[in-house]
Image (tube, coloured by chain):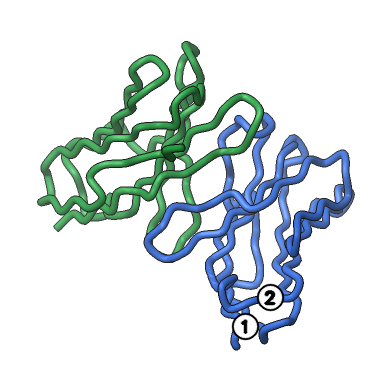
Chain colours: A blue, B green
Amino acid sequence: QQQVKQSPQSLIVQKGGISIINCAYENTAFDYFPWYQQFPGKGPALLIAIRPDVSEKKEGRFTISFNKSAKQFSLHIMDSQPGDSATYFCAASKNGNTGKLIFGQGTTLQVKP
Amino acid sequence: GAGVSQSPSNKVTEKGKDVELRCDPISGHTALYWYRQRLGQGLEFLIYFQGNSAPDKSGLPSDRFSAERTGESVSTLTIQRTQQEDSAVYLCASSPTSDGQYFGPGTRLTVL
């Protein structure tokens, strides 16, 4: 059972544009929602995370929007840069930031110069 | 400071052989996780260690897979009688009690 669905599978954005990646979850017991960035040949790196008691969290050019009633959350990358080209994974866990993570299938982002 | 390290970085083995993968977590991190990433896929949870508690083994795909952790340090993931479908990148992560999970670079396992 796929508990976290991520879309789109791939995304091409022009430099300076906004990249938007969406995730939907099924289990209402999830209480921690991180986003990871992965470059080829590297392990995933924690980018930003949110808990369900807030609807938005911003760190620099990266923003998570969270809709608890719709069981959806999204990553917005403002002013996208070629260096942002990577694979992005959303995830969710039931026991805060120390619980096992259930990952989405990933989105490959290409930012064109 | 040093991040999570894993060894070997690459492992090629023949079908039916046993393999051991090693993870050195960030010092002081009480939690340690193993995940598997098949080519072009998301990460699948395998096993989770938290301090002295019994490990959460709910993600292990078969009894050919096992893992151990020595206290709050090194962990080894063992795959017995490897099969071609075991080919993947095996990722280890560690976490302190108040922050997210930090991943190592992974071990790429190829079973011929």
Residue B75 position within the rendered picture, expressed as x and y whole percent measured from the top left: 33, 27
Give the image quarter of residue B85: bottom left
Residue at image x 48%, y 25%? B56
Q: Earlier in the sequence, mark 1 or mark 2?
A: 1
Q: Residue under mark 2: which chain is it in?
A: A
**Inter-mark Cα distance, 1 to 2:** 10 Å
Residue at image x 35%, y 40%? B5
Q: Is residue A81 above or below residue A41?
A: below
Residue A34 position within the rendered picture, expressed as x and y whole percent measured from the top left: 66, 47
Q: Residue furthest top?
A: B52
Badge 1 element = strand
Badge 2 element = loop
Res. A80 mark: 2
Foreground mark, 1 or 2, reads 2
In the displayed structure image, the side of residue A31 where residue A42 appears, left or right:
left
Residue at image x 30%, y 33%? B77
Residue B48 position within the rendered picture, expressed as x and y whole percent measured from the top left: 47, 29
Hey, what amino acid is under mark 2? Ser
In the displayed structure image, the side of residue B34 where residue B75 appears, left or right:
left
Residue at image x 71%, y 74%? A19
- Counting the numbered discs, the total is 2
Q: Residue furthest front?
A: B1
Closer to the camera in the image, B31 or B27: B27
Closer to the camera in the image, B23 or B46: B23
Residue B62 position within the rendered picture, expressed as x and y whole percent measured from the top left: 33, 36
Disc 1: which residue: A12
Closer to the camera in the image, B95 or A21: B95
Hey, what amino acid is under mark 1? Ile
